[in-house]
Image (cartoon, rainbow, N blue to C red):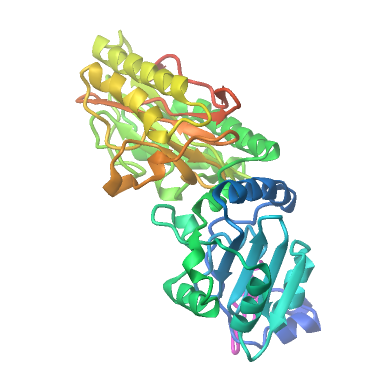
Amino acid sequence: MDPKAAFLRVGAPALPGDAQRSSKQKAISQFPYRSFSVKLDKAPLKMEFLRKKLKWIQQTMKEQGIDLWITFTREGNEDPLAQDLRFSDLTWRSAAIIDQDGTKTAVVGGLEVDTIRQNKFYDEVVGYASEGAAPKLKQIIGKRKPKSIAVNSSYDEGAADGITSGMEAYLKRALKGYSKGFVSGEDLAIALRARLVPEEVELVKKAIVECEKIYDEVESAIRPGKKDRYVHEFAHKLLAQRSLSTAWAFDRCPSVNVGGDPMGHIGYHNTTIRNGDFVKLDFGVNYEGYCSDIQRVYFVGPGNIPSSVKRMFETARAANDAALAALKPGTVGYKVDSAGRKLIVKKGYPEYKHALGHVLGRSTHEIGPLLGPRWPNRYGKQVEKPVQRDMVFTIEPSVTSKLGTCNLEQDVLVTASGYQQLSKPQEDIIRVG
């Protein structure tokens, strides 16, 4: 959307180029400014990808005995999945209904029927007027007589928790005879977002390649006397030169850790780099809507690398490899985490206080199975979900000592029998300075 058009309102001052606007555009500008929902992604899932992913959604519905999936949304608090389902920026209560057989029905306010038809995704678009959405929903659902209806409610997955309390209450009243059959659509959202079609995997690969190129260049900035902030900003300059964006919050990407600085989701601590420091970077690139997420470690200065640093690195490398050996379709997330976690603890290092890995895709922390420990108060049931083919995961167990934190995060694709390396695994400590 044109940023200028988004802020047009009655009485607004003229902007450069206003004189060249068409009469239609000028007419639009006379209407008050209308807000739009914040999106989960900068752009919707490509239509060709969406159509291919429908088979995974249908497959999941069949496996779980779900007859219908309803995404129920409205303006002001849009469902995170609405944009991907070509159901975004709608004013009134609107329902996107997907049948187990793949039939797609939309129920929208009358003024937005043509808007949805133009998207050419829904097989049937039903409009309503003063009677509201409830009668149409009741009629459509009544014809199908479903036993199980998935709605976007989730205890653990934010992107799958899009139905608000008010909208859920409305839907339950509208479908009074069927509301007892409401179940979570969490796994349908995972099928939509976490499993990647081959073309999406190629975009992730490109995000990884660009990330690795910047990593190679940023080594020159890690020097004694320079601050971690300098390294952070140097990476931003390299991004700007390539017209790329960060994979997560700009002010926290990359995260630069020097020596014993506490690890966290922070850009830097304003620490001066010195000879003998162990430095870790956590960085990712967003390429055409798809993300990479990689960590590398460095030793600063001349002389021999201390054996204690080498031991940290070797343990981290072994933990990655142990986790990768466990990564295959059907394995639940906590078992993959356990493989790396146990090795690190057995070597005498403290247990790391995070998950070993997460799904990577259009978001850096994508929804789906979590490769984490069984900490129910923190991770819920995410770690109980099985790994699936066509998912990309990060592998990132941490080894921590007074010298700092060693994490050799890499990105891999789950295949039919195991995994495929997407990023280049770090096999040696990188010397800088």
Q: Nearer the viewer, residue 113 or 350?
A: 113
Residue 278 vs residue 203: left or right? Answer: left
| Residue at 64% over, 67% down | 96
Residue 322 vs residue 195: left or right? Answer: left
Q: Nearer the viewer, residue 147 or 203?
A: 147
- Residue 273 shows in this picture: yes
**The quarter of the displayed image where residue 226 is located:** top left
Magenta region includes residue 311:
no
Magenta region, residue range: 1-15
- Residue 227 shows in this picture: no
Percent position (x, y) of residue 26? 73, 84
Q: In this view, which residue lies farthest toward the bottom?
A: 130
Q: How many circles with numbers are drawn on the protein?
A: 0
| Residue at 44% over, 56% down | 158
76 in relation to 48, above or below: below
Q: Main secondary structure of the magenta part?
A: loop
| Residue at 54% over, 33% down | 211
Magenta region includes residue 7:
yes
Percent position (x, y) of residue 171? 52, 75
Residue 311 vs residue 148: left or right? Answer: left
Percent position (x, y) of residue 49? 70, 47
